[in-house]
Each structure stands twice: as structure tokens, then as C-alpha cells.
Amino acid sequence: MHEEIYNDMENVLKTLRAIESDTGRIDEIENKLKEREFNLVVMGQYKRGKSTFINSLLGSNILPTAILPLTSIVTIINYAKEVKVVIKYIDGKEDLSALDEIEKYVTEKHNPENRLNVKEVDVFYPSEYLKSGIRIIDTPGVGSVFEHNTDVTYEYLPNCDAAIFMMSPDPPISKAELDFLRSAKEYIHKFFFILNKMDVVSKEDLQDVIDFNKKLLENELEREIEIVPISALRALNAKKSNDAKELEQSNISSVEERIIGVLKKEKWRILGLSIVNTLIRFSNEIETKFKLQQKADEMSLEDLEKKIDEFKEFTKLISKYKEENDFVLKGKIDTLIKLIDEHIEQLKVEKLPSLIDNTLNVFQEKLAKKLKTEQLDEEMKENMKQEIQAIFTEFEDKERDVISENIDVIYDDLAQRTNSVIKKIVDTASSIFEVDLQPFVSAENLSEHSEFSFKFEDQLEALAIIGTFIRKKLPLFMGKIVVEKHIKTATQEIFDRHCGRMRYAFVKNIQETSRRFKSQLDDKIDSTLSAIEEILDKSIRMKKESESKVSENINRIKRHLAVIRDAKEQLQNLKNQLET
């Protein structure tokens, strides 16, 4: 039965190819039908442990995992008898690489702001999970997924067939994740919900988190779901060390059984639904363009020009809408930066006094050991480096989470404002030209996060102070007073310098990614206008050249619209068969 359904979809695609000029989209769908490759996508917020989970499934450290965020790069793991890594660039070029070199292309540390212009990384690996045509895909996290290519994960949604949605107790599911799920469910038929890091909380707290997340997810999806708790890191270590007991306690087997069982039974159906939904969306887009073209062609040249002038008057308001969005975004970003400043000042109050006291105590302890001056200097600097690194690493982790939560809200609001502008454009065009239109593009509820790479300064010459009173041959009690005063001053200078550098890293990246995000949303507005204007310009040119051409075009469009209606009816029937 499923072969018949796939054959019917291929026939519909051939029909659409005959009437649509966008062959790129058609080629993508056609390849999907031919290859029958099943995209199992792992999604979730930053720090949920997606890459570790994939590694635990495969039993090896295939993907890099680190504290630093990954860039906006999709990693696709395919089956092959031999290990191979292919780096695909935006300009179409490809390079071969090795597993231990993947991080050079996908991590912010080695490829800041995706300066290497990597499109995606294809990993070929001999795993039983992948043998049946399943491809495991690691997407950038919802919390930092949009670091440089804001909507890379949202744009990948049409390529998804099933998704593993990763969560963790720290914190429970966020608004950004629910917004993402809201968009994802329009494309993805099958979800597996997994709660990672189950061993970082007590059993009671774990159950509370599962219940809380389950309620939110079921309200969003309007159906019952199951959340499976696991420890991906524990599972990975257990597989690498062949520890059966640890593997059982990680609960990874429960996930593996569910995924393999469902996909073995339903893979063809889930994949079919994914393709048929893509075809329905594509058909709707084509239909919208033809409807507007038909309406424009049917008007007289005089009426059409009047309508176009009326539409152009409206478009003058678009710059005003954009300026309003700029103003709102700037205000919210400024408020976020003020919050960061408040947190940094609070950090100084909480940590600086104890840092100074600890440094003085260490100085007294080391002075009592009668170390040589140079050795004392070096040990004091090393102690300061460790103290500073511990303080700012902890602060960085907490502050990133705070910024992520705030950025979620800011960018979600901006995306909704952009959608509102797009809707105004389409609704205005629908009203002026008296035709029912649907948006050509939309700005999903994106959430780009401003991650950064912060390096701790090694330049601690300010603490090279022990020799001061020795070389000057001051009385010992006077020398200690001078040294302790200098330690206090130097410690505060070092602390303030790191506060300033961390603030600069946060603010710089927030502002840069905000500009990029706003620019990409503006592009969606502009592309909506361009799509409408291109159709209208084509009609004007045709009318000025020859009315006979206009008549021919109207007849052609009517035939195409009839074809699309038939195609949509066939696709809906196929969808009904797949859903039963």
C-alpha cells in the first residue's frame, strides 16, 4: 500500500513541476521521494545535552560537546561502512575531514561567527541505527541555535520527518521551547520526548519536572505524550566501558527501544506524511501567486495602475513599521544591558571582598613558607588566576541563562511584530485586489541567542608585588602594609578588568546578533513585498505589450489553478490514508 501512496505523490509532483518555475523546491521534494532517507532530528534548547545524547546512541564521541556553544550549523550523521566526514560550505565547495576535527567547523571556539562559511557537516559512520536509511541530525539549540544564521533550525523544519525533543531539569521547559514546538508540530508528525540529566536531581524532583513538562506539552499538542528520563552522559560512558549495570541505570535502553520500535513499524508512514505535508504547503504557495496574477491580469490597465498606486501608498508605511520595531527592540535591549550591569555590580559586592580576603590569606600562608621572591610571585598569580576563573565561570553560566530567558521574550515579540507587518501587507493586497491571499513567507517565533567566547586574562603582572618591600629593604611591618595595600588595589583592578571584559563580550554579541536578527526579519518583510510587486509588474508589462498575451496568460493561469485544486485534493486524500 505504501508504495502506491509514494507513487501517487511522485505523480502529483510531476504535475506541479509542469506549472511551477521554482524547480529548486521541486528537486528537493523529488530527491526526498527517491532517496527515502528518514531525517530523525534532535532538537532542544542549548545545554540540554543533544550532542551527548547522539553520542550515547552511537556509543562513541562522534560530535563535540563542550561548555562553549555551537555555531548555527547542522550536523548530519549518515550510515556508511567506513568513517568519513564531509564539510559542506555555503558556496557549494566541499572538504574531507576527520571525526576529531569536526569541532574546528561547528564550535564557536574554533569557528567564531561561522567565519569559515560552513553550511553543514555530513558524518558517515557504521552504526546499526543508521542502516535502514535513518539519518540522525543534530540541530543548533533553540537557546543558542540562531547564533549567526538566525532561523537555521526553523528553516530546517520542512526537512524533518520525526524529532527527538530534548529537555532537562535545569531548568524545566521554557517559553522559547514551547514556541519552537508550536512551529515544529506544523511540520513534524512524530515526536519523542526525552528528559536528559535525570541524575542531577532527586527522584522526587525528577518526577515533579516530568509532570510539569508533560502538562505543558500536552496542552500545546492537545494529546497525551510520554517523557522518558535518561542520563545520556552516563549511557555514553557505560557503552565505552562496557558497563552493563551503568547502562541499565542510564535508562537509555528505554529510549532506544521506543525509537527503533516506532520507526521500524511506522517509518514509511511518518516519512510519507512529512512529504505530503510539504507538497500541500508548496501547492498553497503556488496557488496564492497564481490567484494574484489572475486578478491583476483580469483588470484593465487603468484600474490595475490605480490599484498599484494604492498599494504603493500603503507600502510607504512599511518603513514606519520597521522604525517602530527598531525603537522597541532598542529599548528592550537597553533594558537587558542595564540588567547585566546590575548583575555585575552585584557580583562585585558579593565576590570582591572575599576575593581580596582570600588573596591576603594566601599571601600570608605563602610568606610564612619563606619562598623565593620569584616563586612567591608566580604562586600568587596562579592562585589569583584560579580564583578569578572560578568566580567568572560560575557568573558566566548563570548570566547566560538569564540573558537567554530575556532574549527569548524580546525576539519572540519582534518576530510577532514582523508577522503582523507581513499580515498587513498580505491583507492590504487582498483587499485592494479583491483576492484571498496567504502569506508568502512568515517570521517564525525565533529566538536567537547572543553567545560569546570569553577568555580569562593571563596578564596578572599587577600581582608581581612581593619583591617591592624586599628590594627597597623596608622594615618588615612597613613592607607588609605596603604589600597588603597593593594586593587589595591589584585584586580590585584585575576583578574590575574582567567585569568590564565580560560585560563587553555580552553587550557586543547581544547588539550584533540583534542587528542580524532584525535584518533577517526585515528581509522577510521585503521578500513579501517583492513577491507581490513582481507579479503586478509582470501584469503591467504584459498589458502594455499585448492584450492577447494577457488573455492567453489568464487562460493558462485558470488551467494551472484547476490543476492545483486537483493536486491538493489528491494530496489531502493521501494524507487521510496515511493518518488512518
Image (cartoon, rainbow, N blue to C red):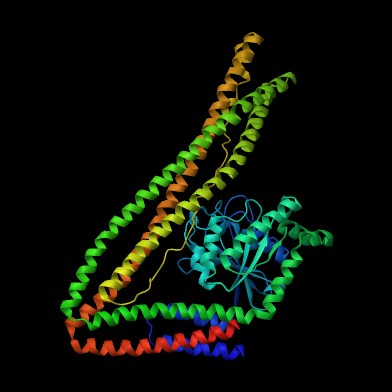
Q: Is residue 137 above or below residue 36?
A: above
Badge count: 0
Residue 289 percent location from the top left of the image:
34, 78
Residue drawn at (35%, 67%), measured in percent from left and top? 527
Residue 446 percent location from the top left of the image:
48, 59
- The C terminus: image quadrant: bottom right
Considering depth in this image, is 38 or 123 the residue closer to the camera? 38
In the picture, measured across the screen, residue 536 lies left or right of residue 349, that is: left
> Is there any visible trace of residue 451 in the rendered image?
no
Considering depth in this image, is 562 or 95 the residue closer to the camera? 562
- The N terminus: image quadrant: bottom right
> Is there any visible trace of residue 564 in the rendered image?
yes
Quarter residue 561 falls in:
bottom left
Q: Is residue 92 above or below residue 354?
A: below
Residue 276 percent location from the top left of the image:
52, 81
Residue 398 percent location from the top left of the image:
59, 43
In the picture, measured across the screen, residue 469 lies left or right of residue 238, that is: left
Considering depth in this image, is 277 or 13 the residue closer to the camera? 277
Residue drawn at (43%, 89%), measured in percent from left and top? 566
Quarter residue 477 falls in:
top right
